[in-house]
Every structure is written in C-alpha cells, then in structure tokens.
Amino acid sequence: MKKKTKKSEEKPTVNKDLSGFDITINSFGEIISTYSIDELNSFLDKNVKDKKLK
C-alpha cells in the first residue's frame, strides 16, 4: 500500500470565481460536482476563447 504524499493532498489553485469547486466520481461512475453544469458552462463562456469561432 502506497502512502499519500503531501503533494497529492494539496488543492490546486483555481480562478477566484471557482473557489470551492470540487469534482469527484462516485463508485457508480457518476460525476459529483459542487457547481452545476450551467454554472460551469457560463464560466467557460466568459473565460475561454472558442478556437472554432476564429
């Protein structure tokens, strides 16, 4: 059994608009998130440029 290192326990830095965001996959393969898909999509629409629209 491997020991977890401190590095794997650290939370990654995220945009201030997504503070508190966490996503996991349960034993049934369902994605569990602290934000709804609509909230994530609106964030991505504001902050990520779509390469296809160039």
Image (tube, rainbow, N blue to C red):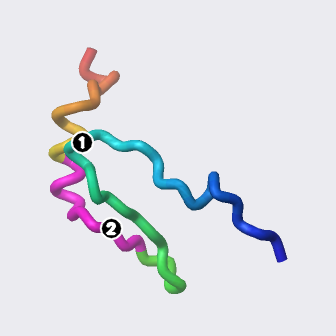
Please provide percent x and percent y for residue 11. 47, 54
Q: Earlier in the sequence, mark 1 or mark 2?
A: 1
Q: Mark 1–mark 2 contact, CB under 8 Å?
A: no
- Is 19 left, or right, of 38 in this rendering? right
Q: Amino acid at mark 2?
A: Ser
29 above or below 16? below
Residue tagged by mark 2? 33
Query: For this rendering, which residue is in front, 32 or 7?
Result: 7
Of marks 1 and 2, the one in the foreground:
1
Residue 2: mark: none
Task: Tell which residue pokes out farthest to the bottom in this image.
Answer: 28
| Badge count | 2
Identity of the residue drawn at 43% across and 77% down: 30
- Is 34 left, or right, of 31 in this rendering? left
Q: CA distance from mark 1 to mark 2?
A: 17 Å
Residue tagged by mark 1? 16
33 above or below 43? below
